[in-house]
Image: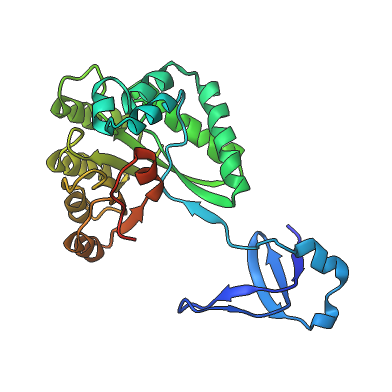
């Protein structure tokens, strides 16, 4: 790729210490998609055309979206109205909505349908500046459907310019065909994990009341390590139900959501080297009154 030179009216920059400042007219050189240099130029060197071209534009490094569930079919728009009327996420899930509803639609969708839906969503993200994305499975919850989702993610890696990392999230919810989480955890460890070796970078688990316990989550994530899957955790989305402990004990890459988190929880994450990831959009989507202490 040839070098791209951009002459800008004004550059706003930030120092490594976080101090924000403006440096006036500047010349920016981009090489192979990376900002190679930024240097000041005299205002007399700026042509009227240069000012017009770059006015109200932003040149930034690509954004990283480190928590997405991009590959799925169907929608749960009707549940938004139910939440506005006071129903909780948990009660909607118990009545057949929530994750299980999306699982049914995703299982029934073909690989090509899922790929086209995912590409459309990915294009929207790219238009907003996202160049790196983590994509989770978790709307299959059986061997065939989870492999289908992971294969779609692999095709997105090949067929789009976005840098993509795959996360296996078989422990997103308990599928209908299992009567308890213990039998499903065994199924994940014995049947699915061996089949997805090399197809994902991470493994995630929804450690929450009504989903998977602290002990089950640790057992599953440690089993995944044997297949090269680095641990991640959906933690403390609804209450302090052990997700942070799971992240600390498994030295997870990240603990995500953290809407209900204490100072001691944050200390545990810091000590284990786990990155806390907050998702404020979730609070708005759920109509929740709790937000992560950003």
Place residue 214 in its image quadrant.
top left
**Residue 7 point in image, percent of width and height:** 77, 70
Quarter of the picture holding the C terminus: bottom left
294 vs 4, nearest the viewer? 294
Q: Residue at x 47, y 76 (%)?
A: 18
Place residue 190 in its image quadrant.
top left
**Residue 263 point in image, percent of width and height:** 20, 63
Is 63 left, or right, of 41 in this rendering?
left
User: Residue extending furthest front?
Assistant: 85
**Residue 270 point in image, percent of width and height:** 25, 65
Is 7 left, or right, of 240 in this rendering?
right
Quarter of the picture holding the N terminus: bottom right
Q: Is residue 91 above or below residue 50?
A: above
Q: Is residue 141 visible?
A: no
Is 293 left, or right, of 158 in this rendering?
left
Instruction: Check the image and tell me how it is coloured.
Output: rainbow
Is 257 left, or right, of 261 in this rendering?
right
74 vs 280, nearest the viewer? 280
76 vs 131, nearest the viewer? 76
Q: Is residue 190 visible?
A: yes
């Amino acid at each position: 790729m040839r070098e791209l030179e951009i002459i800008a009216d004004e550059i706003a920059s930030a120092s490594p210490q976080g101090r924000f400042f403006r440096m006036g007219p500047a010349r920016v050189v981009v090489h192979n998609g990376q900002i190679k240099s930024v240097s000041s130029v005299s205002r007399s060197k700026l042509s009227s055309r240069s000012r017009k071209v770059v006015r109200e534009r932003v040149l930034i490094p690509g954004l990283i979206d480190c928590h997405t569930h991009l590959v799925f079919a169907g929608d749960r728009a009707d549940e938004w109205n139910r939440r506005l009327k006071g129903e909780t996420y948990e009660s909607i899930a118990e009545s057949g909505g929530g994750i299980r509803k999306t699982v049914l639609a995703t299982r029934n969708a073909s690989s090509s349908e899922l790929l086209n839906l995912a590409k459309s969503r990915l294009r929207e993200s790219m238009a907003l500046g996202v160049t790196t994305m983590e994509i989770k499975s978790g709307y299959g919850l059986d061997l065939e459907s989870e492999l289908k989702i992971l294969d779609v993610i692999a095709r997105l890696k090949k067929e789009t310019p976005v840098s993509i990392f795959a996360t296996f999230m078989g422990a997103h919810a308990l599928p209908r065909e299992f009567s308890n989480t213990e039998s499903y955890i065994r199924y994940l460890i014995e049947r699915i994990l061996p089949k997805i070796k090399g197809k994902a970078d991470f493994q995630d688990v929804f450690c929450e009341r009504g989903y998977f316990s602290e002990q089950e989550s640790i057992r599953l994530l440690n089993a995944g390590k044997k297949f090269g899957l680095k641990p991640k955790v959906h933690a403390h989305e609804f209450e302090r139900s052990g997700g942070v402990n799971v992240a600390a004990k498994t030295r997870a890459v990240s603990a995500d959501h953290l809407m209900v988190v204490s100072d001691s929880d944050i200390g545990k994450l810091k000590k284990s080297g786990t990155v806390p990831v907050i998702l404020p959009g979730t609070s708005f989507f759920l109509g929740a009154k709790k937000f992560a202490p950003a």
